[in-house]
Image: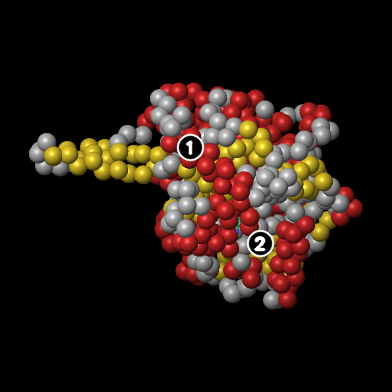
Amino acid sequence: MDQNIIENLRARSVPAFQHMIDGCHVPASDGQTLDVISPIDGRVLTTVARGTAADMTAAIAAARAAFEDGRWAAQAPAARKRILMRWADLIEANAPELAVLGVRDNGTEISMALKAEPVSAAATIRYYAEALDKVYGEIAPTASDVLGMIHKEPVGVVGAIVPWNFPMMIGAWKLAPALAMGNSVVLKPAETASLSLMRMVDLAHEAGLPPGVLNAVTGEGAVVGEAMGLSMDVDVLVFTGSGGTGRRLMGYAARSNLKRVYLELGGKSPNIVFADAPDLVQAAKVAASGIFRNAGQVCVAGSRLLVEASIHDDFVAEVAKAAQGMRVGDPLALDTNIGAINSQTQLDANLRFVATAQAEGGEIVTGGDRVLAETGGYYMAPTIVTGVTRDATLTQKEVFGPVLGVTPFETETEAIQLANATNYGLAGGVWTSNLGRAHRMIRAVRTGVMHVNTYGGADGTVPLGGVGQSGNGSDKSLHAIDKYINLKTAWIKL
Ligand code: ADP
């Protein structure tokens, strides 16, 4: 895309956003709004409705009514498919506008947002639209005097709570399979990244989705998210975000209707480099982009670099060179590699992590500071810390920022022990020319996704889900469909 197109879109004023309930834009029940601060310059971009618990209850009621009368679930699969395909087309047709709006709201560099946001969301919606009439029930292998059938039914009302790092991509991972299977949905975008996703919800209605099937309530997690979690009328809750919120959601489910809760909770993913890696310069470049793109605000980011001791110094120098070659700045400039930190809160937290790492004996090789403060925006230099021990904060806690901790290892066994030394288990990578070692590492590292001689970029055909405290259940691939259906057995005496 041309920079001029981006500048024209940047110059547009952004209207105030309201909830989408039962096909209508509505303000908060008490009329309150939340300021939307752009991380590009720290200025107020627009407002969103500051949802109340009553707003969430109304959205859930609309979703329930839509589900019960079958206006979506009872449509022929081909009809549902047509609408979802049209939705994907509209998202793609509006991709530049959606991407720029999203970046003004959340700060992701536009080069990445253009690929990872609307285009990926459209692809995800098409994937599940195409799949929806290929999901069959089953006939059980019973004795001949009975018929055992397994029906796959929609669950009813799905609640989806999404984060701010990739709102459209992650939103689509949840909305697309949920809607494809005939469910109604209530969406809660993140406070600091609602706008592009709310536009995407508008486009679903333009594509012909009946009112009430997809509702969206903006506002604070602790208010509207909690109301969703505690609802007696939400059947399944799907979430991507922090471990703390994930724990709360399980608590809400326990205190209400025992709704099924699926959590994707981030990680502390090890990127493990052996001296026999096929191309160490390439490995260093990918190690840098694997943590620093989107300023490290990526759930699968390779935030722990484990390096064989014999190459440690040279390899770290190479990663530092790659990091220093990445341009930090205006997320809407096409040549920016690392955009803004999403919020002041997040920037402050990142800087605290760096101070803690130093206090624990870590050494900063590059970065460590806020940069471009004169813009009013939230930017941070890509940061590499060496001497990170197994028990250090940078090993144990997710930063969710552009901070890479480096730890040397001597043997394959030690690499595995370090890789598995956290409570997380979302992603990982190994760089080696030894095929046997690659497979041993795939088996040994406790994680949901393991990369070999690459890092990141797994497409929609494969699942993404964590083990341990990285969560449960998967987004992407046909496996994600399981979250949005109930199995019903029919046992018939013949
Ligand atoms: P992050 O630290 O990445 O912002 P959060 O878990 O705080 O992660 O946020 C992810 C999503 O969870 C956001 O949409 C946020 O509004 C929502 N959220 C935050 N707190 C709660 C809560 N108590 N109940 C439900 N949702 C919440």
Residue type marked 2: Val
- Location of residue 215 with respect to 328 vertically, above or below: above
Residue 307 is situated, as x and y percent measured from the top left of the image, at 59, 63
Residue 97 is situated, as x and y percent measured from the top left of the image, at 72, 31
Q: Which mark is residue 399?
A: 2
- In the picture, the quarter occupied by the N terminus is top right
- Residue at 43% in and 31% down: 70
Side (left or right) of 237 relative to 164: left
Give the mark nearer the N terminus: 1 vs 2: 1
Note whether residue 315 is visible: no
- Residue at 72% in and 58% down: 346
User: Quick check: is the Cβ at mark 1 less than 8 Å away from ligand 1?
Assistant: no
Side (left or right) of 119 relative to 381: left
Q: Residues within 10 Å of mark 2 (few under 14, many from 20)?
A: many
Residue type marked 1: Ala
Q: Quadrant of ligand 1?
A: bottom right
- Residue at 62% in and 46% down: 55
Dot 1: what SS? helix
- Residue at 82% in and 29% down: 8
- Residue that mark 1 sits on: 65
Q: 295 or 160: nearer the eye?
A: 160
Dot 2: what SS? loop
Residue 94 is situated, as x and y percent measured from the top left of the image, at 67, 28
User: Given contact means CB atoms under 8 Å apart, are the residues at marks 1 and 2 in contact?
Assistant: no
